[in-house]
Amino acid sequence: MGQTRRKQINTKKSAVMSTFLYHLWMIATLYGTLLPIIAVVVYGIGHEGNRSFTYYMLHALTYLGKSLMLSVPVTVIATVFATVLSITLWRIDFMGRGFSRGMALAPLLNPPFVGSISFIMLFGKRGLITHELLGLTVSPFGYWGVLVMQVIGLTTLGYLFISSGVRNMQTIYEEAARTSGASEWRIFRTVTLPILKPEILGGALLIFLASMADFGTPLIIGGPFQTLSSDLYIQITGLYDMTGAAISGAVLLMPCLIAFIAQRKVIKMRKYYGKDLQKYTLVYPSLHPLVRYGLIGCCFLFQGVILLKYGFIIIGAFTKNWGHDYTLTLEHFIAVSHREWTPFMNSMKLAVGVGSISSLLGILTAYVVHHGKTKSVRALEMVGTLPAAVPGILFGIGYLVTFKYPLFGAGQLYWSGGPRIVLLGTGLIIYIICIFRYLNVGLRAGLNLLEHQDPNIERAAYTLGAGRLRTLWTVSIPLLQPAFRIAFVKNFTSTMTTLGAIIFLLLPSNKVAVQQIFQIITSSEIGIAAAMSLSLSSLMGLMLLMFYGLIRHKKVYVTIRRLKG
Amino acid sequence: MNIRCKGINFSYDGVSALRDLNLQIQSGELIALLGPSGCGKTTLLRIMAGLLPMQQGQLFYGEREITNWTPQKRNTAMVFQSYALFPHLSVAENVAYGLKAKGHKKADIHSLVKSTLQKVQLIDLDNRMVQELSGGQQQRVALARALVLKPDVLLFDEPLSNLDEKLRINMRREIRLLQKESGISSVYVTHDQEEAMAIADRIVVMNEGRIQQIGTPREVYHQPKNEFVAEFMGVSNMIEVRGEKRLFRPEQIVLSSSGKHEGIVQWIEHLGGLEQVCVTTQYGDLIVQRFSRESLSCELDIGYPVRIDLLGDGQKI
């Protein structure tokens, strides 16, 4: 009797506790994601700037036009490339396919703007092609350079998304069409493409958002061509014009939110594959040789460009002074090591910290969202994924204008005389912004896994007498591990290479490697920039290998033992 | 159109799936390929459709050798286990797909689709998306999509295995009728021996990539060539009579108070109109069938002593 009573009280306590935690987390998420975005808009409208509101607005709209002029063609071209690449690498069998698949992912190990180093080396004022070959001293920096670099970088992003659709697609519809007498080209047009539509559209929207958010590439090689995002950076760091930046930010937000809503619609589109269907080989049984070699050629061409990009970064890292003195040297690496390793250490700490905490929180949020059916839970999911749509630099400005004030920003209402900087001046804010920015990754991965999981597994635990918390710890969380691993690797690499969100929040004491590379490129020290990005990529590669070893330690152990005999 | 398979061998990554397979199918015949999973029946069907490339052997449709023809060029149509209806198209568009691909005129397509949908009783659902249909309706669309092409050969890959029992029995009757009406040579893959016997003119029993027996449903049931076929086609009692193994089906053994052999009831299974009774005898455990209504006059329970009689001499294996 007493025991039952105690159990009841315990259950009640745990219910109160979980409700409390849930609301606390809800408020924290709102605070960390939605509020900063709203704050940008409010700041832009509410603060008197140096110039009139109309001026700022016209300025922002002009740059929005330029951004769209870049992002729309980039999206179209990169989506086509990504689709071609996905189909070639997963549906055609050819020599070097495995290597090509690996290569297609290599750009993930680099900050998006690092490709620009090779571009400068080839086409810069003292570039190999412009100066040495053509004898020019002007550089063709500008629109086309940015377009090409973005296409190269973002095709990988699209490939990741679209190839997962290709890998999971059911070829049985194509077989049905084949036995109905439709030609292969007709099948591709009328069956394959419609079935892949959700993935292709989803990939296109991701590319669009990333292109809109990229401020590094235009800044480094855009010359006179600047976009809304890069203009935001200039307004803050060059002109110290917060009001102008906030208004431009609000304008930038619009197309991104539209893309975000569109993407949510696309994700909800029916996906035409399921595990219940039979799975036959993905490889095309017969393909016209012209098509086959054309596709493989396209793929190799693209990979050639990526290899070229990396090749020149490596060459640049070992060349004394690009454009002037081409002797081989190790001095850049020595300089990097002398400049102290703190930025690298900071990057690693940040990436590991954010990778674990953000992924964990994201997955726990997914668990709550999946099991709760109320409106507030759906809102939590929406708010949690919102930062995926917001350009990093804009999110950073949001934190800047929110946490400029004491009491986590609330002080601006009640305590305007208090000390100006509270959270902003600490290293903690970098962690907080990254955690909320990448919360959506764990959330998506978790939800995806939970949707495909048999709900009876948890019910089985309940019927066997396990309570809610015990079930969570002993059944649900272990089952969510694969989602955690995916989210961790993704968040780790994103945080290592991110710049936009944190660039305005960093202090000299917690500088990260990417920021330093960015500063060095803009000051045209090509050799050191190349050496640093090479070091950063290698470090990331090593860390990923290490994580892989940790996750698969049993398998690795077995392999080593087998190798030993 | 008659079909001839000559010396077909097929292996997946070195694992043999079909071994030296020879088969002749008459024009207008419905042949069932029957066997446990992994016996090679689906592999053979996919080779006939051209979905798997031939590794060794020859395939003839009529007088023409089509061994290396693409699936598009062979005039076949296939009904898939998962239906494989195009999820982004409506019912009518699904049925029209092959006709469009083959370049028929718009007006012809319209009337052909209409008459075929009428045949499978789906004419009112022509504008629905396929996901909105029930499993049985989806199966009918798949059937219509194949029939509308007037193919030389119809191929069925376990088309009913995703339906529930009652629907399955109705559909197999319907498929049989439509096939006879159209007179298209058909190959029907299934792992369900009852379905095979109900639908097919002849049954090809397969195991481990080899044909075990080809025969009419009666032949493979009553005169199986080996123990595998005997076991696979239904409940089999193997009794040694004068040093020879003989097969008695449960309906060939009767419970009778004046029976020659005595035994003890081991278990009883009620199947509605019928009952199966397992009796331990000097020949081992025998499974006997009787009508349930007989239990009114002769109540049985586990452990009861009974007497049985064997009808006829059984089938020599």
Image (cartoon, grey):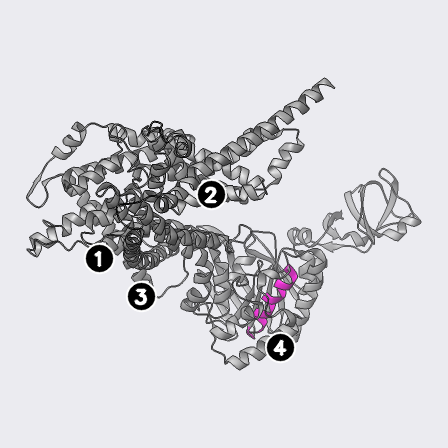
Local packing at callout 1 (Cα closer than 10 Å; few below 14, some 14-19, many 20+) is some
Disc 3 to disc 4, how far (Cα)?
A: 41 Å
Q: Earlier in the sequence, mark 3 or mark 2?
A: 3
Under mark 2, the amino acid is Val
Q: Which quadrant would residue A512 be assigned to in this image?
A: top left
Disc 3 to disc 1, how far (Cα)?
A: 30 Å
Q: Are marks 4 and 1 on the same chain?
A: no
Report the residue marked by disc 3. A290
Q: Is residue B89 visible?
A: yes
Q: Which quadrant is home to the C terminus of chain A? A: top left
Instruction: Give the residues in magenta.
Output: B135-152
Q: Are marks 2 and 4 on the same chain?
A: no
Report the residue marked by disc 2. A383
| Main SS category, magenta section | helix
The chain under label 4 reads B
Disc 4 to disc 1, how far (Cα)?
A: 58 Å
Under mark 3, the amino acid is Leu
The percent position of residue A301, horizontal first and vertical second, equals: 25, 56
Q: Judging from the image, what secondary structure is the residue with disc 2 in? A: helix
Q: Which quadrant would residue B177 be assigned to in this image?
A: bottom right
Is A355 situated above or below B125?
A: above
